[in-house]
Amino acid sequence: IPVDPFDLIIFGGTGDLARRKILPALYRRFWAGQMPPEARIIGAARAAHDDAEYRAMIRAAIGEFVAPEKQEPATVDAFLERVRYLTLDARGDDGWDALCGMMRNGVVQAFYFSVGPGLFGDLAERLHRHGIADAESRIVVEKPFGHDLQSARALNATLAQHFDEHQIYRIDHYLGKETVQNLMAVRFGNMLFEPLWNARNVDHIQITVAETVGVGGRGDYYDRSGAMRDMVQNHMMQLLCLIAMEPPYAFESDAVRDEKLKVIRALDPVAPGDIVRGQYGGDSGGPGYLEDVENPDSLTESFIALKVHISNWRWKGTPFYLRTGKRMRARTSEIAIVFKDPPHSIFGVQERQKANVLVIRLQPNEGINLRVTIKEPGPGGMRLVEVPLDMSFKEALGPEAEDIPDAYERLIMDVIRGNQTLFMRGDEVEAAWAWTDPIIADWEERGDRPRLYEAGSSGPEDALMLMHKDGRRWREVK
Ligand code: BG6
């Protein structure tokens, strides 16, 4: 179904994110017929380019980041006709009158701030001063939304001078991932899981986001952030919220975000002994973290594992183990809900059945898998065996699931539709920093040194201990 006609202005329109994610996502939506013919995309940046040069850049980006079967030349040409370029100085006056002259009435207006947070204030202020944005315009801002609570508050305050909260779309692209939304469908669209979804029945929850890539190329940003700021404060926190939150009264933006906020506020501080930080070393002569970031003294973590508790009625006593890292053995993201053992085995001690585990795989091969115990087939008596009830979306849904839209496709279309459900509200981001800040402050104060782990492994040994000491184990990274 096509969305309403829109003008999308991308500040930072020649940048890496625009090239890799935003423009290919828009093209794919165009290819799928979701962009109405009147839609326009205006890339804006400081460099002097004309429309033709900008279109050539986007053509190359589509060539690189869109599947070949979606690149029919006529479709690419038709998409590029909707694209304009504008030379504009976020901190000066150049280009703003021209932008004003390009705006149309009667279409949705969205401004994508695909620039460093240092420019958010300048852009917001000029959009108003030049009479370009109005009370219905939307702005889209990217992570990192601040570096700590204080800077996040300052950013929120700056944006609030010119825009109302209902106009601000803070992106966390994990919320746009198909399986993350499916998590809500599984929880609240079935009777089967929700009655068991609590500390009485769940032994623990594991959330793993393992990556094989290192930080090469983004060393400067990453070394000032580390895994805690880069992944835990936002993506992992959002996953945790969706698993742990109470049922919202409706799948609507504030209903969902209110429930997420309550989870973040109920998080306990984390004891230093419940955190393991790591840094990858080099493998077979390749660069390790310290070489990648060109900082031999860096104490920044490229891996973190931590045990988190939520103090509320539903979750008191059930730990959430989170782990994420770069240069790990495999690229895999999953959430595992590990249920408690049955209270008593009627089959004798030998046949103690293993706990049920519900695994929600975010990537790759999105799907849901439930481990259950059954009788081993054959005449050998009552021997038990575990089997997976495996539902790969691709297998279960066929061609429809072959073409799962990228997170950015979904999220940008939601901006045009005016749906904020999958975007972070200002208070949520602040609450997440309020929880993160003391943890980081503690290890900065102590000069905490991350443990070395081998590139291509599943993280430092101590991370295994974090669970072993509780009599539990991580699922394999594979
Ligand atoms: C980004 C982080 O937000 O998410 C990156 O800054 C990380 O460091 C990326 O690699 C992971 O996203 P995805 O979609 O590849 O899991």
Image: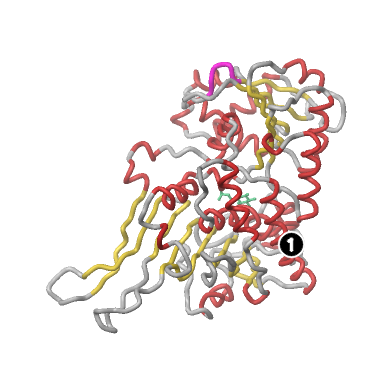
Q: Amino acid at mark 1?
A: Asp
Q: Which residue is mark 1?
A: 437
Q: Residue at x 72, y 34 (%)?
A: 12
The x and y percentages for residue 151 are 79, 51
Q: Residue at x 68, y 74 (%)?
A: 272
Q: Residue furthest right?
A: 92
Predominant SS of the magenta segment: loop
Relative side of 397 to 134, left or right:
left
Q: What is the total number of numbered labels drawn onto the structure image? A: 1
32 versus 448 height, above or below:
above
In the foreground, 65 or 363: 363
Range shown magenta: 35-39
Relative side of 467 to 403, left or right:
right
Q: Residue furthest left?
A: 379
Please tell me whether mark 1 sits on a helix, a strand or a loop: helix
Q: Within 10 angstroms of label 1, few (less than 14), some, or many (20 or more) residues?
A: some
The x and y percentages for residue 127 are 79, 28
Q: Residue at x 70, y 39 (%)?
A: 165
Q: Is residue 38 magenta?
A: yes
Quadrant of the image occupied by residue 159: top right
Q: Quadrant of the C terminus?
A: bottom left
In the foreground, 59 or 42: 42
Q: Residue furthest bottom?
A: 349
Relative side of 36 to 138, left or right:
left
The x and y percentages for residue 225 are 72, 57
166 versus 57 height, above or below:
below
